[in-house]
Image (cartoon, rainbow, N blue to C red):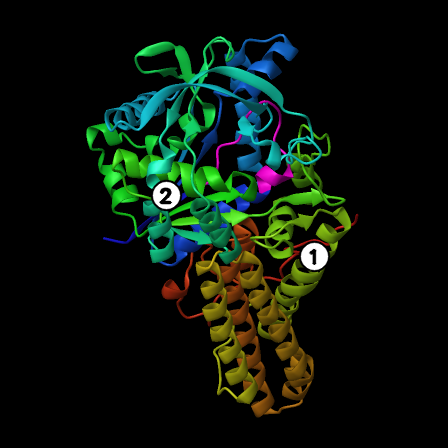
Amino acid sequence: MPATAYVSTTIPYVNARPHLGHAFEYVQADSISRHLTRTGHEVYFLTGSDENSLKNVLAAEKAGMTTQALVDRNVSYFGELLASLGVVTTAFIRTSIDPLHLAGAAEIWRRLDANDDIYPKDYAGLYCVGCEQFYEPSDLVDGKCPEHLVEPEPVSERNYFFRLSRYGDQLAEAIESGLLQVHPQSRRNETLSFIRSGLADISISRSATRARGWGIPVPGDPSQVMYVWIDALTNYINTFDWLHDDTGYHRYWTGAERRIHVLGKGVLRFHAVYWPAMLLAAELPLPTDVMVHGYITSAGQKLSKSLGNATDPEELVGTFGQDAVRYYLLAEFSPFGDGDYAEERLVARYNNDLANGVGNLVSRLTSMVERYRGGVVPTRGEAGALEADLESRTADAVRDSVAAMDRFDHREALARIAELVRRSNAYVGERAPWHLAKAADAGDDDAARTLDTVLYCGMDAVRRIAILLRPYIPAGSGRLLDAVGEDPTADFGSLTELAGRKVGKAGPVFPRLES
């Protein structure tokens, strides 16, 4: 039975349409899921929607709709984005209506309460509706929320609190021992620093009145609803029927080789501190990896619906295509740092690496196979030093790109693949099949045999490049494999003899783009 892995994105608020930051996280998690599948894992890939927030209530009031109607409508936008990006998940969880989530969130509350980890307390603080969280005055920038650049509103009410302060030592030990790995190192250090500074208990409910009655009721106290983040974090295991010993829960959570959360830096504490502490209190297994990405910015400012600078990713896909958007996000942006979006960089990256790089390579080779060998891949002859070098470079690219993705570094992985594409194009130029064909036509049998070798090795390089690209641009990878007569689902372990395959001159697998 293959090893299993679990991958999740955060679940976004659905008070408005998705922006490019959502697309970035989706394709990051999708590439991780596909990478793990390619390396022999059975993967459970989860995303969903965070629907029990006050933001959604306020957006519905502004639109003159019920909150349920608003989230039902807006959830469809996120589903459409996933489809347009070619992101394939195992499940999509909705926190306002999914019965497993509603039951699971209530059960975790009861477990924390039974462990004496929940108590009531009067509380006053500064609350940002955009973040759905309280801020200390020292956390503000010029008196404003650092994320949404608005002044938080003062709130005073009686809430329930979670005894987070109990779990500082256990959390630090889990991170320091590697039981819970936070990526990159800078976020690990940030998390440990926060824990070591002393954890304060956190508010985990809101009055039902202030929440307009929207949210999951606190078990035993309908005057309160669960704080949206506490409710939302439990979605990661509530996708399974873990209350009833679900086999999926045991296979993909308790028994998984890796349990990976992909998230943005703005919600680090929720995922690397609050959620693991809740799991410790409920005596449930921790995630193994918290992978923290930066923000996509515009002119240095975070993309945000509330800031009004959001870029519609579906429009980008409609204009430039799925391959271009996915490749740009994964090849251009650091997996861990911020990066500034620019349309001209999207076009340039796609044209340089895909249209002019691998697209040109496959077009040249299929054209020459058709012209010189009647569209049939020839039998490989004796390899020379250049062929040995190409094979070595291919092995290096496979090893290094896989190792990079094991570290969640999609940009480094694609850089190693791009190097192989450049080397493969250079190999064709150095071997100059057009000169070999001319010599063969003049009766040079050695040139004819070398030509066979060059065409075979070039086509073999293309199919291996295509397999390497599959986690990042699955649609483009399939077209590349089809162009060289290979099964679009082929993997390194299933490759068979290439000689004798019938291929035709490939059209532009990656047509050039214009801004």
Is 484 in front, or is 21? 21
Sequence-wise first label, 2 or 1 = 2
Q: Is residue 179 visible?
A: yes
Q: Residue farthest to the right?
A: 515
Which residue sits at x=49%, y=84%? 381
Comparing labels 2 and 1, the label whose residue is closer to the camera? 2
Q: Please tell me whether residue 121 is drawn above or below residue 511 in the rendered image.
A: above
Which residue sits at x=62%, y=27%? 17
Label 2 SS: helix
Is 58 in front, or is 245? 58
Q: Which numbered circle lies on residue 349?
A: 1
Image position of 79 (left or right of 250): right
C-alpha gap between disc 2 and disc 1: 44 Å
Q: Which numbered circle lies on residue 168?
A: 2
Could you say where residue 361 lies in the image, as x and y percent from the top left?
64, 67
Image position of 174 (left or right of 348): left
The picture quadrant where one finds residue 508 is: bottom right
Which residue sits at x=51%, y=9%? 212
Q: Amino acid at mark 1?
A: Arg
Q: Please tell me whether residue 369 is drawn above or below residue 211 in the rendered image.
A: below
Q: Is residue 89 visible?
A: no
Is 206 in front, or is 201? 201
Could you say where residue 259 lies in the image, as x and y percent from the top left?
36, 47
Q: Amino acid at mark 2?
A: Gly
Q: Are marks 2 and 1 in contact (CB under 8 Å)?
A: no
Range shown magenta: 8-23
Could you say where residue 310 lies in the image, as x and y percent from the top left?
69, 34
466 inside magenta stretch: no
The picture quadrant where one finds residue 127 is: top right
